[in-house]
Image: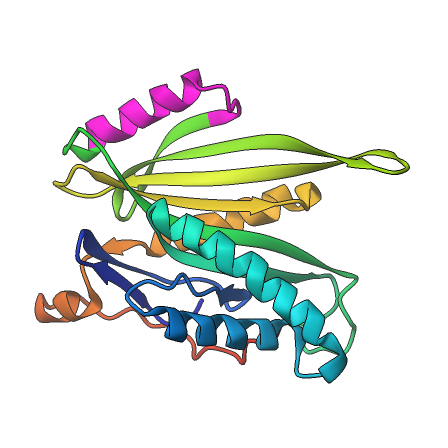
Amino acid sequence: MGADTDVAGENTTAFRFQVQHEFHGIPLGLGVDEDVFDAQMTDFARDYWGEAEELEPLRRLLKAMYGANARQLAAEGAVYHALGVFPIGGTADGAEAPERVSRCTLVMSVRDLEVTDPGLAAAGIAEWLGRTSVGGEAHLITLPAGPAVVHVSGSRAVWEQERGEEERFFVRIEVWIPFPDQDRVLLLSLSTPDVQDLFMYQAVLADVADTIAFGSTEAAHEAGEPAVNAPAPHPRTFG
């Protein structure tokens, strides 16, 4: 896991978390002007595709796609967005190359509730998820941050192609964590088209959810809480 990441905003209670080194943060443009956001997206596209001149069209396309998506996510309450690139197979020392690479996206967002009690909020969320048309399974769980709900569902996308329909399946794993003493909920959402890696991603998101702590790192230090020991981040290069 990487070092603590703090999230705080004008209308958001601070919280902190850690993610695996395989996650690469995607700018959301929060708290910065358009020029800064544009530069951030340019850097992200360069990190993804590299600096080869012939890849400039791909960098521009990636920048446009992720930039538009980031604005939409931010408008819906997202406070963190990342792309996960996980090598499957191979050896940790690099002696054997991975058999393939699995990708996912992780979004953390804050949503309003009408209940301030975390236990009641979690129970209500689980019941609501069970009644929605999304389907899947919802279960009440307990995390270090408090009561929560985990929800797993699948979806199918179809594209019309010249040679006929093309379909792809996706899996989505969510963890809903009510804020303590506030009418808000933190939603962790991980989605991937690599449905065969469902069990791996359930473990990935579970590890992230276990690190969620409400309040900033500075506030935790002032309160005398022990710091979280985390290994130094590895260089983040896309697979």
**Residue at 39%, 57% in the rendered image:** 80
- Please give the range of residues in magenta: 119-137
Q: What count of labels does the image hold?
A: 0
Against 191, residue 94 (above or below) is below
Against 125, residue 3 (above or below) is below
Against 57, residue 50 (above or below) is below
Which image quarter holds the C terminus?
bottom right
Q: Is residue 102 visible?
A: yes
Which image quarter holds the N terminus?
bottom left
The chief SS type of the magenta part is helix
- The outermost residue toward the top is 131
Q: Where in the figure is residue 180, as x and y percent of width and height?
A: 16, 43
Q: Is residue 216 left or right of residue 23?
A: left
State the residue in front, 119 or 124.
Answer: 124
Q: Quadrant of residue 9?
A: bottom left
Q: Where in the figure is residue 233, as x and y percent of width and height?
A: 46, 77
